[in-house]
Image (cartoon, rainbow, N blue to C red):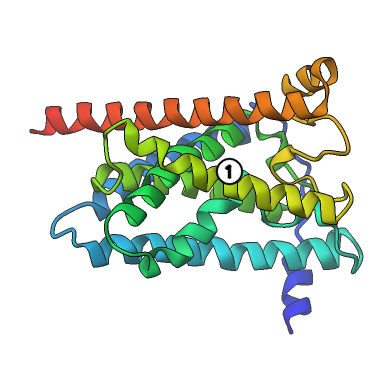
């Protein structure tokens, strides 16, 4: 029954080009939807329980859609072979795991740190995929839509954490997310080593230069490990800037609303 459903939803399409009509319109519509649902869900009363349930439900949506994607790739794309390249542990996958366990996290600093991670690293992963969407374009409608909706949901989660006040504004709170980020990096590197380069989680495989644009050239020039160090530093910097940007936008909105 599952395979029948997967087969019936394998609707072929010509992969849209980056910055095509499809890319621009779907992204704009998605970002407007992010703003709408963020404003809708931060209406009072906004309790800790409500915040936790919103994030948990987002994690559940991501998890269910990821199971579908994995089954689709296994059955339709790879002819019943598993491709470790698509193992769900990229930077854009980590918000799914945090959202799923969020209600189980202790209240206080632990939850706030998770929220700041979702606000910063989650937003970075979402917005960068929309800016450079070649990895989201597939020859099947469901896979392409999955990629766009996934990354728009990451942006929503980041905005919700900001607008709800769950993510602290103090800059030092971002520092607490760095150990969490590097734990994720360690897990990603372990997967890459265990699979002997078949997987490329976080794009930090020790077996070949980074495949991401710009950083590929840096990795070729400096070497694999220095290239990885530069790449991870750039991610942390980008995440911090994304955090400052989302906080500034919502502070400006709140002042005008007030």
The foreground one among 45 and 115 is: 115
Q: Position of residue 131 (x, y in %)?
A: 59, 28
Q: Quadrant of the C terminus?
A: top left
Considering only vertical position in the picture, is 90 above or below 1? above
Q: Residue at x 56, y 39 (%)?
A: 125
The foreground one among 7 and 230 is: 230
Residue 152 in sight: no
Furthest residue in direction bottom, as rendered = 1
Considering only vertical position in the picture, is 32 above or below 237? below
Q: Secondary structure at mark 1?
A: helix
Q: Position of residue 171 (x, y in %)?
A: 32, 30
Rendering quarter of residue 105: bottom left
Residue 53 as seen in the image, left or right of residue 120? left
Q: Residue at x 74, y 24 (%)?
A: 226
Q: Label 1: which residue?
A: 182
The foreground one among 65 and 59 is: 59
Q: Quadrant of the N terminus?
A: bottom right
Residue 88 as seen in the image, left or right of residue 168? right
The foreground one among 42 and 237 is: 237
Q: Position of residue 166 (x, y in %)?
A: 27, 49
Rendering quarter of residue 207: top right
Residue 208 in sight: yes
Label 1 crowd (10 A; few <14 / some 14-19 / many >=20): few
Furthest residue in direction left, as rendered = 258
Q: Position of residue 45 (x, y in %)?
A: 13, 60
Q: Residue at x 83, y 38 (%)?
A: 206
Question: Count the marks: how many?
Answer: 1
Rendering quarter of residue 36: top left
């Amino acid at each position: 029954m599952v395979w029948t459903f997967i087969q019936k939803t394998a609707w072929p399409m010509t992969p849209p080009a980056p910055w095509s009509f499809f890319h621009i319109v779907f992204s704009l519509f998605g970002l407007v939807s992010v703003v709408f649902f963020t404003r809708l869900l931060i209406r009072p009363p906004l309790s800790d329980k409500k915040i936790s349930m919103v994030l948990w439900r987002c994690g559940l949506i991501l998890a269910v859609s990821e199971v579908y994607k994995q089954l689709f790739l296994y059955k339709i794309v790879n002819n019943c072979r598993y491709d470790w390249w698509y193992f769900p542990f990229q930077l854009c996958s980590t918000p799914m795991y945090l959202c799923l366990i969020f209600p189980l996290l202790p209240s206080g600093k632990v939850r706030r740190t998770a929220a700041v991670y979702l606000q910063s690293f989650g937003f970075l992963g979402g917005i960068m995929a929309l800016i450079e969407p070649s990895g989201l374009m597939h020859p099947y409608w469901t896979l392409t839509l999955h990629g766009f909706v996934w990354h728009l949901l990451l942006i929503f989660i980041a905005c919700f954490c900001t607008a709800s006040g769950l993510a602290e504004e103090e800059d030092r709170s971002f520092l607490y997310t760095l150990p969490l980020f590097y734990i994720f990096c360690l897990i990603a590197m372990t997967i890459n080593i265990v699979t002997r380069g078949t997987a490329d989680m976080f794009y930090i495989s020790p077996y070949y230069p980074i495949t991401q644009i710009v950083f590929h050239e840096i990795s070729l020039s400096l070497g694999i490990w220095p290239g990885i160090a530069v790449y991870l530093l750039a991610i942390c910097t980008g995440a911090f800037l994304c955090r400052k940007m989302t906080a500034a936008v919502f502070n400006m909105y709140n002042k005008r609303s007030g």
